Amino acid sequence: MGQYANQPDFGTEATEITTSDTIDNSTDLGGACLFVGTGGDVKVILTGVTGSGGSGFPTASEAVIFKNLPDGAFLPVIVSHVLLTGTSASDLIAVK
């Protein structure tokens, strides 16, 4: 979305998200903005955070919580992971 890493100015893919506290390639969203169907808090790791633990992956301590998002909101940041712990919002869609 927008001017991030050669992405178009509009979404061309949408995928339902299953939140997970696992932070590895299997849960990497590949850089997506989020649509929040049912509001609440969303705990995410922003794309570009490489981690300090030496594994090459970020850790949950490097995540940020966006609080009190309303129903039907777009979160206008590019994220790599959505964590289960700390996320109360649901019906999340990754848009790329």
Image (tube, helix red, strand yellow):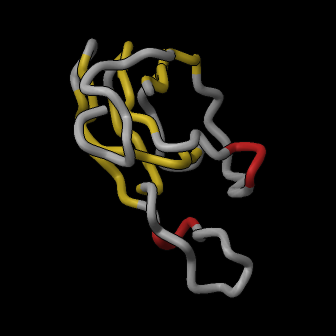
Residue 82: % across, % down: 53, 43
The answer to which quarter of the image holds residue 84 is: top right
At 32% from the left and 46% from the top, the residue drawn is 4
The C terminus - image quarter: top left
| In the image: residue 66, left or right of residue 7 | left
Report the residue that reaches farthest toward the front.
Answer: 6
| In the image: residue 47, left or right of residue 28 | left
Instruction: Choose between 47 and 82: the one closer to the eye.
Output: 47
83 up-or-down from 89: above or below: below
Residue 83: % across, % down: 56, 47
Residue 11: % across, % down: 37, 19
At 47% from the left and 68% from the top, the residue drawn is 49
The answer to which quarter of the image holds residue 58 is: bottom right
Residue 63: % across, % down: 45, 62
Q: How many marks?
A: 0
At 44% from the left and 36% from the top, the residue drawn is 32
At 22% from the left and 22% from the top, the residue drawn is 70
